[in-house]
Image (tube, grey):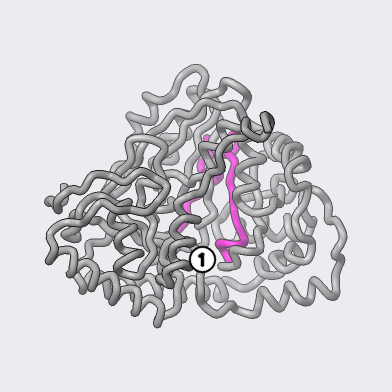
Amino acid sequence: MTALSSLPPPTVTIFEQMSGLARELGAINLGQGFPDMPEDDTLTGAAVRSLTGRSNQYPPMRGLPELRGAIAGWYGAAQGLEVAPEEVVVTSGGTEALAASILALVRPGDEVILVQPLYDAYLPLVQRAGGIARLVSLTPPDWALPLGDLEAAITPKTRLLILNTPNNPTGTQLDRATLEAIGALAERHDFFVLSDEVWEGMLYDGAEHISVLAIPSLRGRAVKVGSAGKIFSLTGWKVGWVVAAPAIAAAIADRHQFITFTTATPLQWAVAEGLALPSSWFATHRARYAHARQRLVSALTAGGFSLLPAQGTWFVVADLAASGLPADDVTVATRLIREGGVASIPVSAFYAEAPERGYLRLCFAKQDATLDEAAARLVRFRTGQRTIGRIGCETGLAAPAQPCKPAHKHR
């Protein structure tokens, strides 16, 4: 029993907590980021053909040559990047790509700069590698990266900066000028940049993705992470990849072979077929999500919610104070799921310290009927809480509840 008692307590993420409550209570789940739309059979058909007509045995550790070539070709056509197949390592999803990259680049005692709000895997992975996290926060409501704060966080021990662009949960992305400034800092202080770009295929309103690999000063010291699960909206496939200069890619592959070694062969074939589809297929696919986004935004805005501008991902962020609700996201989210019948994610869950507490993330990757009912419930909840005047403190979550606060003006 001594050995068992020494194990760390299990961690249940806010995503699991909210999804579990949604199932228990029969709530509409706008919390966890997965679509409930009918799946396009183009990719699933390719997977079936691959399962029955191609190999189901181990592919090469770095990924099928056909898929690595397809990834390189897709980035050339979609983003104008010159990528060689030997710069690509296929992984079992974006999170494994992050894990292999962090383990390859970070040594015990190295400092790693993380930008909040952040994907919940970043910090634990840095800690597993023996790294020391330094935190910088985006500035709401436009979620800009304060370059002065970033530069102030750099020390002689800085080894890596982790970015997420387009960002989850904010839906914003870093512009070229910011990336060029980051490149200048990386050159001056000699650190790597790991850029989580899994949402690169989900941009709206004419926005174009700018990768770290498009910045000359970063091309030789940056790692780009991509995900077929996000590009094709097939989150359960878990086919991801990293793209980096050959020496960096080799170091990442060395770690990858001792994590998952390889990724399901038929799905690799299917993704290779998918990346060869014409650009019109991707435009049509993206338009489905643009439609869903606009449907939810329009209904919530008409119902008195204030939503922050976002260029991409499957999420929109509600500003609680500007919507006439208390800036206490954990309490609001819990009351919303229990009393309003809609699951959301408090943005404070994306922080390791000093969180912003005035925002909720909502996923719009749902069918029209789901969005319409969710919006109606959200508006009824907002109207009822404004009538009551304040929200109680019972959360029912593992995270500690925050004190009740009256609604206040948007800063």
* Placement of 145 over or under 240, stated as above or below: above
Residue at the disc numbered 1: 34
Residue 127, can we see it?
yes
Quadrant of the snapshot with the N terminus = top right
Q: Nearer the viewer, residue 341 or 39?
A: 341
Residue 186, can we see it?
no
Dividing the picture into quarters, in which one does residue 366 lie? bottom left
**Are there few (<14), some (14-19), or many (20+) residues within 10 Å of tag 1?**
some
Q: Estimate the x, y position of residue 281 in percent, counting from the top left.
A: 57, 75
The residue stretch that appears in magenta = 205-232
Dividing the picture into quarters, in which one does residue 400 lie? top left
* Placement of 63 over or under 378, stated as above or below: above
Q: Estimate the x, y position of residue 173 in percent, counting from the top left.
A: 41, 51
Could you tell whether 238 is left or right of 371 in the image?
right
Q: Amino acid at mark 1?
A: Phe
Indicate whether residue 149 is drawn in magenta. Answer: no
Q: Estimate the x, y position of residue 377 in percent, counting from the top left.
A: 29, 74
Q: Residue at x 42, y 60 (%)?
A: 312
Could you tell whether 387 is left or right of 230 in the image?
left
Residue furthest to the top: 156
Q: Estimate the x, y position of residue 231 in percent, counting from the top left.
A: 57, 63
